[in-house]
């Protein structure tokens, strides 16, 4: 079983649509990160959420950390083709020397 | 451009070949990492170096051999690989140790083992 379960695994939508992707776990975390990985590139950190219930906005992207700090969501408003990529959630395991553990990702395709 | 470069970007090798992947960071960081990204599997941490010392070996087979000659360079030496080792190999760096630091990733080397 994976520590972080992301859903959906694949998402194909039209430009202008809204979408939400999820990152779930049965474990509690002190913080959670979201990355975007574009084709042919490495992951790039988008945001870190640290407080239960926290909401952070990055332009059209809204990130929320669950109240119990076990899950997180990423909502994109009016998706654009430039949003296409692999969205990864990750957590730092402080009890394992700060090892960064990733979910398997949500592959998003936004068609013009 | 994240300040972390990797060469080559693509590599095809036979199972009996020996090759090396190179990573260089221009960010003045002291910690460097190797990750493996396979299709339909989460990114897996392979090795961590902090101030040139290896601090993590995540049960990686000995056919993968890392080398960190200084804080700016990291190599992954490959020998007698298997087809299941085909994957995207990502290098990352962070200012100090892993705990709490943002990691900056390179673009990866796409490895195919025939």
Image (cartoon, coloured by chain):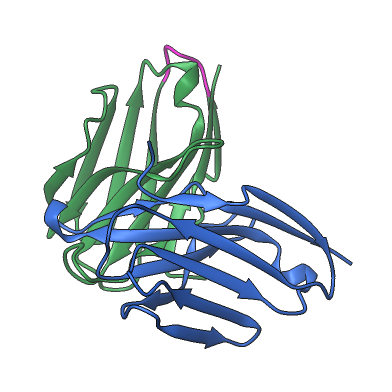
- Left or right: A23 as drawn, with respect to B18: right
Residue A87 percent location from the top left of the image: 56, 60
As rendered, which of B100 and A79 lies closer to the eye?
Answer: A79
- Left or right: A28 as drawn, with respect to B87: left
Whether residue B106 is visible here, answered yes or no, is no
Q: Which residues are magenta?
A: B13-17
Residue B51 percent location from the top left of the image: 12, 60
Count of picture labels: 0
| Residue furthest front in the image | A68
Please name the color used to draw chain B: green
Q: Quadrant of the N terminus of chain A?
A: top left
- Left or right: B106 as drawn, with respect to B53: right
Q: Is residue A71 magenta?
A: no
Chain seen in blue? A
As rendered, which of A104 and A42 lies closer to the eye?
Answer: A104
Residue at (45, 52) in percent of width and height: B6
Residue at (24, 38) in percent of width and height: B66
């Amino acid at each position: 079983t994976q520590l972080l379960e992301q859903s959906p695994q694949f998402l194909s939508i039209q430009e202008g649509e809204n979408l939400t992707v999820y990152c779930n776990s049965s474990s509690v975390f002190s913080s959670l990160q979201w990355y975007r990985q574009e084709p042919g590139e490495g992951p790039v950190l988008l945001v870190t959420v640290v407080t239960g219930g926290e909401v952070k906005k990055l332009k059209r992207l809204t990130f929320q950390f669950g109240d119990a700090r076990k899950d997180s969501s990423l909502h994109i408003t009016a998706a654009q083709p430039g949003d296409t990529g692999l969205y990864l959630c990750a957590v730092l395991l402080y009890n394992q020397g700060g090892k960064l553990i990733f979910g398997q990702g949500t592959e998003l395709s936004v068609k013009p | 451009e994240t300040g972390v470069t990797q060469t080559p970007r693509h590599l095809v090798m036979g199972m009996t070949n020996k090759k090396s992947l190179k990573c260089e960071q221009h960010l003045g960081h002291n910690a460097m990492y190797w990750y493996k990204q396979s299709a339909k599997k989460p990114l897996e941490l392979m090795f961590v170096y902090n101030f040139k010392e290896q601090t993590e070996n995540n049960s990686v087979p000995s056919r993968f051999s890392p080398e960190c000659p200084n804080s700016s360079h990291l190599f992954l030496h490959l020998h007698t690989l298997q087809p299941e080792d085909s994957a995207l190999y990502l290098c990352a760096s962070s200012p100090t140790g892993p705990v709490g630091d943002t990691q900056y990733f390179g673009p990866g080397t796409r490895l195919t083992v025939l």
